[in-house]
Image (cartoon, rainbow, N blue to C red):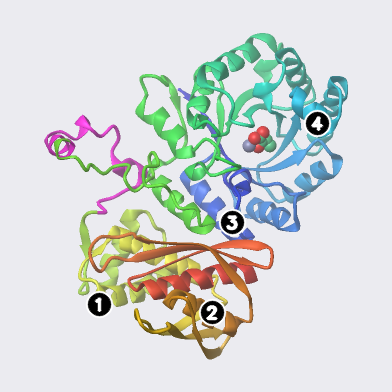
């Protein structure tokens, strides 16, 4: 059996998605989850880009034991040094160098000729290799690079010590047959290619990122770059869950290939990334979308009841989706029942976390007769968000109606002080946000607001996802509650707290 190395770039290319900024604390949490998921390489950031990115890569390096931790660098000495410094504490560190090689990039971005680019590739790979044993080299925009030049660049990088050659479809322009022939050509024309692992990095501008990555694998690539939920620059990157599950489900096509991913952790990881980035997973998203395993048509439902395989090509439990339709707990359930259910869903919480979730669970069970797995997921996520609470919601009261001006009274805790403020607004939610702004002393602009029922029934938990702009920063927030006003304020304060942090 041959392993496909899973290189996750959620924290680097994924975070480049417009509006998806993560704090270094959140990055570390995601990295720990990625390690639990079993990814082989975690690209934790672009250390020269900002002090925050540098810190994120250093924090991840300190805490990750099994996976390789990778930092991105341009072919510039300062970048290479920053990547090296940020990876100092890593058990297994990798520097990922990239340099554009297509005519359009060389001419307009760099104003450099082929021989200058080749010299830069040589110099930088050598420099990086002196500092780190594990070097990955990406000729950026490979799929639009002239083949003969691409072969020369790859050969040079390998000669200077690169042990992984990544082939990016930077602008998501290729289709699967083209990628297949490109990887085959690299194998046939680069004399020293057997000294390196070929990797694929596909963007989703034409919706082909995962298909292209799988095609590269069929042609001989043995590492795939991907992100959770397919987030990333523009239309995103190839999604981890799609690549991993395609290899697992289509063993007949991907004969003798496997990944080290523990697929039962895919759903949790997807939820975490969605929660931290504020990027909702579309309901029809393959593998992790809410509808991915739902059958609406009577004909399908009937057939699935007779034999699941008629319309289900994989078992939802394989990605960690467990009986969300099942009533799991109620108000008489105890701490032990809750703790064991949380374990079954895939959460590893310590005693004090279980105790806190239990308190919230009891409050919820008082409001809701039936508590589902999805409800528990929301409670755990709310608990995780609480860790980052600087401003904390104490209470909110609204007076609203079709014939009065909505009015809100909000109480917020900051450090040990509780203060209260009132405001009117265009609606009850607007009034609440205005009252909160007065207490916090900020001016914010609401850019996006979505409310969704995430569990079932009239007493379902509502989840609010929003984006606010404070000064020139756009920050996402998420909050959930059976009360939509509370969910809105929790989401709002979640975003404000991220801003303050
Ligand atoms: O898309 C791209 O080309 C990249 C490189 C940095 C590998 O993200
Ligand atoms: Zn990319």
Q: Quadrant of the C terminus?
A: bottom right
Residue 434 circle label: 2
Residue count near mark 4 (Cα–Cα under 10 Å), binned few <14, some 14–19, many ≥20: few
* Residue underneath mark 3: 28
- Which residue is depicted at the point 15% across and 33% down? 307
**Residue 137 percent across, percent down from the top left:** 71, 30
* First in residue order: circle 3 vs circle 4: 3
Assign a secondary structure to mark 3.
helix
Q: Which residue is painted at 63% across and 46% down in the image?
A: 12
First in residue order: circle 2 vs circle 4 = 4
- Nearer-the-camera pick, 393 or 321: 393
Picture residue at 39% right of the left edge, 48% below the top: 267
- The CA span between labels 4 and 1 is 63 Å
Q: Which mark is residue 108?
A: 4
Q: Inspect this view and state whether residue 290 appears.
A: yes
Start and end of the magenta stretch? 300-324
């Amino acid at each position: 059996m041959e392993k496909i190395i899973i290189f996750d770039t959620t924290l680097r290319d994924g975070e480049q998605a417009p509006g998806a900024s993560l704090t270094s604390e959140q990055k570390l949490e995601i990295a720990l989850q990625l390690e639990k998921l079993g990814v082989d390489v975690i690209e934790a950031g672009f250390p020269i880009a900002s002090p925050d990115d540098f810190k994120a890569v250093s924090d991840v390096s300190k805490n990750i034991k099994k996976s390789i931790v990778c930092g991105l660098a341009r072919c510039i000495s300062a970048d290479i040094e920053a990547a090296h410094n940020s990876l100092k504490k890593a058990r297994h560190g990798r520097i990922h160098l990239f340099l554009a090689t297509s005519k359009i990039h060389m001419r307009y971005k760099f104003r450099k000729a082929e021989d200058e680019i080749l010299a830069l590739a040589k110099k930088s790979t050598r420099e990086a290799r002196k500092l780190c044993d594990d070097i990955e080299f990406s000729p950026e925009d490979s799929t639009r690079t002239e083949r003969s030049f691409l072969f020369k660049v790859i050969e040079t990088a390998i000669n200077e010590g690169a042990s992984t050659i990544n082939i990016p479809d930077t602008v998501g322009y290729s289709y699967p047959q083209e990628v297949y022939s490109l990887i085959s050509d690299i194998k046939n024309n680069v004399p020293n290619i057997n000294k390196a692992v070929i990797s694929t990095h596909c963007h989703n501008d034409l919706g082909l990122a995962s298909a292209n990555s799988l095609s590269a694998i069929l042609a001989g690539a043995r590492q795939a770059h991907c992100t959770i939920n397919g987030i990333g620059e523009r239309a995103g990157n190839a999604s981890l869950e799609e690549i991993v599950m395609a290899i697992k489900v289509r063993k007949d096509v991907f004969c003798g290939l496997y990944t080290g991913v523990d697929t039962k952790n895919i759903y949790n990881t997807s939820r975490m990334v969605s929660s931290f980035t504020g990027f909702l997973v579309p309901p029809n998203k393959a593998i992790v979308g809410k509808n991915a395993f739902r059958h609406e048509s009577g004909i399908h439902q009937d057939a699935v009841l007779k034999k699941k395989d008629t319309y289900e090509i994989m078992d939802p439990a394989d990605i960690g989706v467990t009986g969300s339709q099942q009533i799991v707990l109620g108000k008489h359930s105890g701490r032990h029942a809750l703790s064991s259910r949380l374990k079954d869903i895939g959460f590893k919480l310590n005693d004090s976390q279980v105790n806190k979730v239990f308190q919230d669970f009891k409050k919820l069970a008082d409001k809701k007769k039936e508590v589902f797995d999805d409800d528990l997921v929301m409670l755990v996520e709310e608990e995780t968000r609480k860790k980052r609470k600087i401003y904390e919601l104490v209470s909110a009261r609204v007076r609203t109606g079709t014939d009065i001006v909505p009015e809100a009274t909000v109480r917020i805790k900051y450090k040990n002080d509780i203060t209260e403020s009132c405001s009117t607004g265009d609606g009850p939610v607007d009034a609440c946000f205005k009252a909160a702004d007065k207490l916090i002393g900020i001016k914010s602009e609401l850019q996006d607001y979505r409310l969704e029922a995430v569990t079932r029934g009239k007493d379902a938990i509502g989840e609010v996802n929003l984006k606010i702009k404070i000064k020139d920063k756009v920050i996402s927030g998420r909050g959930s509650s059976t009360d939509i006003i509370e969910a809105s304020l929790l989401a709002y304060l979640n975003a404000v707290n991220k801003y303050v942090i």
